[in-house]
Image (cartoon, helix red, strand yellow):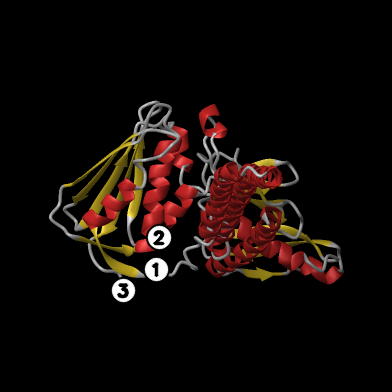
């Protein structure tokens, strides 16, 4: 595009200079003094070279002309123009610049008046100009003998071309920026998809491992039941049957959790908002975790608000609280200590905080803890069963209630999950 505009500029310079020469010549032609010429008697003798007298208003000239030259009268006239009304480079430059500016935004131009035969500079429109950063035209001859000519200079043509290309340049820059943004977005999407696929694969491996364990245990227990039945040991049969039921219940719980989380797409969640009493709900929730066989769990709770009800979907909100408490128990190296505090905020939200003494989160883990399939990279986290879907489900349910969730944590200093639920019934 730049080369195309440069070619147009060179063509415009030639055309503008040619037009300026004609216009300047027409102006000088009108200013030439009236002349009277006559031919002496020698012309009647058919001589080739004769003298011709030219009379102006205040001067008489005598010139020798070639009678065989058909352009002799024109040469005489040009002589009068040159001697009595010479070229005005300042006027020629002004006309040239005006013509050229109609096509290009030109800052400055210069004109040289040159004696072509002697290669001599006769006149310049501005003697102080610097031609270092200019583009020059070809020499235009202005007399029939080819002895006089003019040349035009255009200063700083690059800026003029760039100004002419301004719209295209802006549009090109916008398109380049859009392309760069698209490439960055595409690059980030590929990285995110690879990362998500890796987390998904790890989750599937963990899921397969967790499924295999209760299934293998249940199969072993059932095989032992058959063996004991054959031996008539009916007392131990009951014990093994209860163990089998426990393992199968674990498998059922895993299956339900996967189904629950896989259906946690916000477009698919149908909430059944109910008016739930706060104290009975949390009392029942905490009682469920006080008698675990694996660990001794210390759970305390405090309600520092006079509000009696919370407006949530009972099933989904119960799952949210279960996830937070189970994570606190699972990732505690010592006996879990959990504190649940329910209070009311100034902006009419019910705040529920679940604080524990777990292994905590690093600053990097806090950024991704609510992403699907994400699990921490520490050995303790990797050694625990899990699919990396629980907190993603928690966040989706809280947001579906028009609420917010955040986590405050430091490594080895526990976690504090804070839920903000609107204190109104959602229609």
Would residue 251 appear left or right of 117 to someone viewing this image?
Answer: left
At numbered mark 3, what does the secondary structure look like: helix, strand or loop? Answer: loop
Q: Residues within 10 Å of mark 1 (few under 14, many from 20)?
A: some
Q: Quadrant of the C terminus?
A: bottom left
In the drawing, what numbered circle is on residue 271? 1
Label 1: state its secondary structure: loop
Q: Is residue 99 left or right of residue 201?
A: left
Give the mark nearer the N terminus: 1 vs 3.
1
Whether residue 367 is situated above or below residue 424 in the rendered picture: above
Quarter occupied by residue 33: bottom right
Q: Residue at x 51, y 45 (%)?
A: 126
Label ID, residue 124: none
Q: Nearer the viewer, mark 1 or mark 3?
A: 1
Residue sitting at the far front: 232
Q: Cα distance, mark 1 to mark 3?
A: 10 Å
Screen quadrant of the N terminus? bottom right
Q: Residue furthest bottom?
A: 427
Residue 92 visible in the current orientation = no
Q: Crowdedness of circle 2 by 10 Å Cα count: few (<14), some, many (20+)?
A: many
Please state which of residues 58 and 16 is positioned toward the viewer in this rendering. 16
Which residue is tagged 3? 427
Q: Residue at x 35, y 49 (%)?
A: 405
Q: Nearer the viewer, residue 139 or 213?
A: 213
Q: Are marks 1 and 3 in contact (CB under 8 Å)?
A: no
Which label's residue is closer to the chain start, 1 or 2? 1
The residue depicted at 72 percent of the width and 52 percent of the height is 138
* Residue 401: percent from left, percent from top: 35, 62
Tag 1 and tag 2, C-beta contact below 8 Å: yes
- Gap in angstroms between the C-alphas marked 3 and 2: 16 Å
Q: Secondary structure at mark 2?
A: helix
Judging by the rendered image, the residue that carries numbered circle 2 is 316
User: Relative to residue 41, is residue 182 drawn left or right?
Assistant: left
């Amino acid at each position: 595009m730049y080369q195309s505009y440069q070619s147009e500029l060179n063509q415009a310079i030639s055309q503008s200079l040619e037009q300026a020469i004609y216009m300047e010549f027409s102006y000088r032609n009108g200013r030439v003094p009236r002349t009277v010429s006559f031919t002496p008697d020698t012309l009647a003798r058919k001589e080739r070279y004769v003298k011709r007298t030219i009379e102006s208003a205040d001067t008489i000239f005598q010139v020798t002309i070639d009678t065989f030259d058909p352009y002799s009268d024109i040469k005489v006239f040009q002589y009068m123009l040159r001697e009595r009304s010479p070229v005005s480079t300042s006027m020629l430059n002004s006309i040239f610049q005006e013509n050229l500016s109609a096509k290009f935004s030109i800052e400055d131009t210069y004109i040289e008046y040159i004696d072509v035969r002697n290669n001599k500079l006769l006149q310049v429109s501005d003697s102080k100009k610097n031609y270092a950063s200019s583009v020059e035209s070809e020499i235009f001859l202005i007399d029939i003998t080819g002895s006089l000519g003019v040349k035009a200079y255009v200063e700083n043509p690059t800026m003029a071309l760039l100004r002419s290309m301004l719209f295209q340049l802006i549009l090109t820059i916008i398109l380049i920026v859009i392309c760069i943004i698209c490439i960055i977005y595409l690059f980030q999407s590929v990285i995110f998809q690879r990362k998500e696929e890796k987390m998904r694969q790890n989750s599937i491996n963990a899921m397969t491992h967790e499924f295999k364990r209760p299934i293998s245990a249940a199969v072993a227990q059932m095989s032992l039941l058959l063996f004991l039945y054959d031996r008539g040991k009916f007392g131990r049969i009951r014990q093994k049957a209860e163990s089998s039921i426990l393992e199968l219940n674990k498998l059922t719980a895993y299956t339900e959790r996967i189904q629950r989380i896989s259906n946690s797409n916000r477009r698919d969640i149908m909430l059944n908002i109910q008016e739930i009493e706060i104290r009975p709900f949390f009392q029942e929730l905490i009682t469920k975790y006080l008698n675990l066989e694996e660990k001794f769990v210390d759970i305390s709770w405090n309600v520092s608000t006079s509000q009696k009800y919370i407006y949530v979907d009972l099933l989904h909100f119960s799952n949210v609280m279960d996830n937070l408490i189970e994570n606190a128990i699972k990732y505690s190296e010592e006996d879990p200590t959990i504190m649940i505090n329910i209070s009311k905020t100034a902006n009419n939200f019910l705040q529920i905080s679940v604080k524990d003494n777990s292994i905590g989160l690093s600053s990097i883990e806090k950024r991704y803890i609510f992403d699907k399939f994400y699990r921490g990279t520490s050995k303790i986290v990797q050694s625990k069963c899990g699919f990396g879907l629980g907190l993603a489900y928690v966040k989706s349910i809280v947001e579906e209630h028009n609420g917010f969730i955040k986590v405050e944590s430091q490594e080895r200093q526990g976690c504090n999950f804070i839920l903000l639920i609107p204190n109104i019934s959602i229609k």
